[in-house]
Structures are given as structure tokens and as C-alpha cells.
């Protein structure tokens, strides 16, 4: 179980006392919003919520009792500003849920350079910097949780989503490396890797989801996996769980997996 650490900002002493602080990015919609709703219903977390859509984020904050920290993580200073504001408001971050992410669908040859840079920044670079900035105070306290929202695409690759898959594959290697680095500490790292999720993600990327399998799961189902990671400190979760089988087949026999994937389209 995640332990509550002492110390809080005077601005939030009454609200923060006895409650762990969770910072959730991408909280204005999708998985981040569902995670905020789930944790907010428990009334044991102080929630710091980040997202680009200020109006939606404000509504999520009101429903969950969280604190809205709007900001764009695609900018070079966005992640530093967010962590500064989080520590100003709560004094610490006990758990980071890096849920902000965007997509793009289409052949790499026709992908605009600015779209490549934006995906790399939001999906991978921002997450790395957020972890870099919260990790020292977690290590100083001797506890913490880092939950990265990956994707099945990061384990096996997906046609016409090469850059998106690369960002999620980068998160997978980042999580593995961090676990080795943090071995022996009480700071735990989890990668939650869903398949398709029924969120506005596909509408925002400009292409609907068209595959028969895996069928999209609800954002609430992914949020439950995030909560289990926070409470139990587990290292890896696939949603739905059976997706762990093709991911492991790809790792053990990539040639066989690619042959099967090409036949399945």
C-alpha cells in the first residue's frame, strides 16, 4: 500500500493532511479523467489534475474534488511549470500518473514534421521529464509510485502508427530501465498497456478505430488497472489481460509474431 508521507504546503495543509497526493496528466478526458473519477470517489487522495482543455479540466476537478493545474505539456517549459505548481499547492507528489497522450494515423512518408515532434514531446519527452522532476523528492521520502500509460502498440508495433508506437515503446524501455535503477528503493514504476480504449483519442487523431480485435475497452477499466498499480505497486498491466500473451510472443519469437500479424492484417 502506498504510504502517506509527512509534510505539506501551508496552502493545502487542511486538505493534504493524512492523504497521499496524486498528480494525473491528461485528466481532462479519456483514461486520465476516468482515473481522476475513480480515485476521487475514494476520498483518500488529494488529486492534482493537469490537462490542456481548461473548461473540461475544471469540470473534472469539481466532480472529483481535485485541484486543476491546466497546462500544455507540448512546450519545453510545460512540465517544469506543472511540477513547480504541484509542489507549491501540495508540497509533494506521492504518485504520478502520466496519462497525457496524443495520436496520429497515416503513412510515415506523409506525416508532417510538426506532428512527429508533437507526438514525441507529449507522449514521451514530457513523461520522462515529469518523472525526472518528481523522482528526487520521492527518493528523499523513501516512497512513491510512477504509473506510465503505455500501449499495446509499444510492444508489437502498428502499421500507419509508427511514431505513436515508437513513443509508447520508448515508455516501455524507460519503465524497465527505471525499475533496475530504483531496485532496493520503495519507489515503484508501473507501465499500464491497454489495447484500444473507447475514448475521444481516435476522433482527435483523425482516423476511427477499424480493427475487429482487440475490441475497445472502457477508460474506466484502464483506470481500475491504474488504481491497482498505485495501491499494490505492480510493475506491469495489460488491459485486457490477454494482451500480455501476444506481447510475450512478440518478445520471444518476433519473426513468428510478424508472420501471424501480417496474415491477420
Image: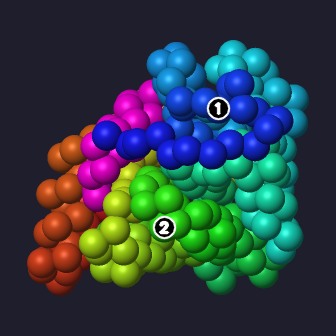
**Region of the chain picked out in magenta, as a range:** 220-237
- Asked which quadrant contains residue 119, the reply is bottom right
Mark with earlier residue (1, 2): 1
Element on which disc 2 rests = helix
User: Looking at the picture, how far across and down is residue 104, in whole percent?
Assistant: 65, 62
Q: Magenta stretch containing residue 223, yes or no?
A: yes
Q: Residue at x 74, y 58 (%)?
A: 83
The secondary structure that dominates the magenta segment is helix
Name the residue nearer the viewer: 199 or 83: 83
Please rate how many residues cluster around mark 2, counting C-alpha atoms within 10 Å: few if below 14, some from 14 to 19, many from 20. Answer: some
Report if residue 124 is visible in the image.
Answer: no
User: Looking at the picture, how far across and down is residue 145, in whole percent?
Assistant: 44, 53
Residue 25 in the image: above or below residue 252: above
Per the image, the residue denoted by label 1 is 16
Quarter holding the N terminus is top left
Residue 166 in the image: above or below residue 8: below
Element on which disc 1 rests = helix
Amino acid at each position: 500500500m502506498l504510504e502517506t508521507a509527512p509534510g505539506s504546503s501551508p496552502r493545502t495543509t487542511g486538505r493534504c493532511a493524512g492523504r497521499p497526493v496524486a498528480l494525473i496528466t491528461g485528466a481532462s478526458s479519456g483514461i486520465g479523467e476516468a482515473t481522476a473519477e475513480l480515485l476521487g470517489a475514494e476520498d483518500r487522495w488529494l488529486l492534482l489534475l493537469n490537462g490542456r482543455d481548461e473548461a473540461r479540466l475544471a469540470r473534472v476537478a469539481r466532480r472529483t474534488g481535485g485541484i486543476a493545474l491546466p497546462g500544455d505539456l507540448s512546450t519545453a517549459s510545460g512540465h517544469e511549470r506543472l511540477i513547480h505548481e504541484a509542489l507549491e499547492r501540495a508540497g509533494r507528489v506521492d504518485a504520478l500518473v502520466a496519462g497525457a497522450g496524443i495520436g496520429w494515423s497515416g503513412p510515415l512518408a506523409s506525416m508532417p514534421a510538426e506532428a512527429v515532434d508533437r507526438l514525441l514531446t507529449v507522449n514521451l519527452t514530457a513523461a520522462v521529464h515529469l518523472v525526472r522532476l518528481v523522482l528526487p523528492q520521492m527518493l528523499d521520502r523513501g516512497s512513491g509510485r510512477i504509473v506510465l500509460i503505455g500501449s499495446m502498440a509499444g510492444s508489437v508495433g502498428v502499421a500507419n502508427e509508427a511514431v505513436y508506437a515508437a513513443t509508447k515503446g520508448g515508455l516501455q524501455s524507460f519503465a524497465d530501465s527505471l525499475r533496475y535503477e530504483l531496485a532496493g528503493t520503495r519507489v515503484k514504476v508501473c507501465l499500464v498497456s491497454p489495447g484500444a480504449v473507447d475514448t475521444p483519442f481516435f476522433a482527435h487523431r483523425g482516423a476511427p478505430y477499424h480493427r475487429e480485435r482487440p475490441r475497445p475497452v472502457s477508460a474506466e477499466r484502464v483506470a481500475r488497472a491504474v488504481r491497482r498499480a498505485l495501491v499494490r505497486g505492480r510493475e506491469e498491466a495489460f488491459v485486457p489481460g490477454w494482451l500480455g500473451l501476444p506481447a510475450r510472443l512478440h518478445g520471444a519469437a518476433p519473426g513468428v509474431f510478424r508472420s501471424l500479424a501480417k496474415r491477420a492484417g
